[in-house]
Amino acid sequence: MTEVTLRHAQEAVDEYVRTVVVRYFTELSNLAQLVEEIREVARVMNRTYGDQSARNSAEQHDLADELADVLAIANQTGTDHTAAFLANLETKTIRDRNRHYNNPKLTDLPQRD
Ligand SMILES: [Mg+2]
């Protein structure tokens, strides 16, 4: 299987939008669609890891597929997902270095040396 980078994924989504969808929807339409897709992710998470169960097999969706929907919609704004992901992870790593270890609600975390 060929490795797919975030950049390749963005380019594939852009090609799909320009050839199949014809053009990007407006930003506000994509925002609404993003919220719809997030709802689908939440539903799968709740049915899979939460207390609710799926009513029927048609309600059982693939979490990976739903998360891919979310990533695809984020393509319109000209964001470089690779750079944004790396910058975001670096920010969170620095910001949250001790935050979660110091959270008394997370008593099941392993202790740091
Ligand atoms: Mg979806």
Image (spheres, grey):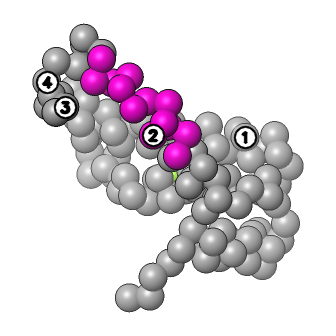
Element under label 3?
Answer: loop
Picture coordinates of residue 27, whole percent (x, y): 82, 46
In this rendering, which labeled residue sits more in front, label 4 or label 3? 3
Density class for disc 1 (Cα within 10 Å; few <14, some 14-19, many ≥20) is some
Task: Find the residue positioned furthest to the bottom.
Answer: 1
From the image, tell me which residue sits under label 2. Answer: 93
From the image, tell me which residue sits under label 3. Answer: 112
Q: What residue type is labelled 3?
A: Arg
Marks 4/1 in contact by CB < 8 Å: the verdict is: no
Residue 73 seen in the current view: no
Picture coordinates of residue 28, whole percent (x, y): 81, 40
In this rendering, which labeled residue sits more in front, label 3 or label 1? 3
Q: What residue type is labelled 1?
A: Leu
Marks 4/2 in contact by CB < 8 Å: the verdict is: no
From the image, tell me which residue sits under label 4. Answer: 108
Q: What residue type is labelled 4?
A: Asp
Query: Along the line of sight, which residue is nearer the eye, 101 or 18?
Result: 101
Residue 84 seen in the current view: yes
Element under label 4?
Answer: loop
Asked whether, in this view, residue 101 is left or right of residue 99, the answer is left
Density class for disc 4 (Cα within 10 Å; few <14, some 14-19, many ≥20) is few
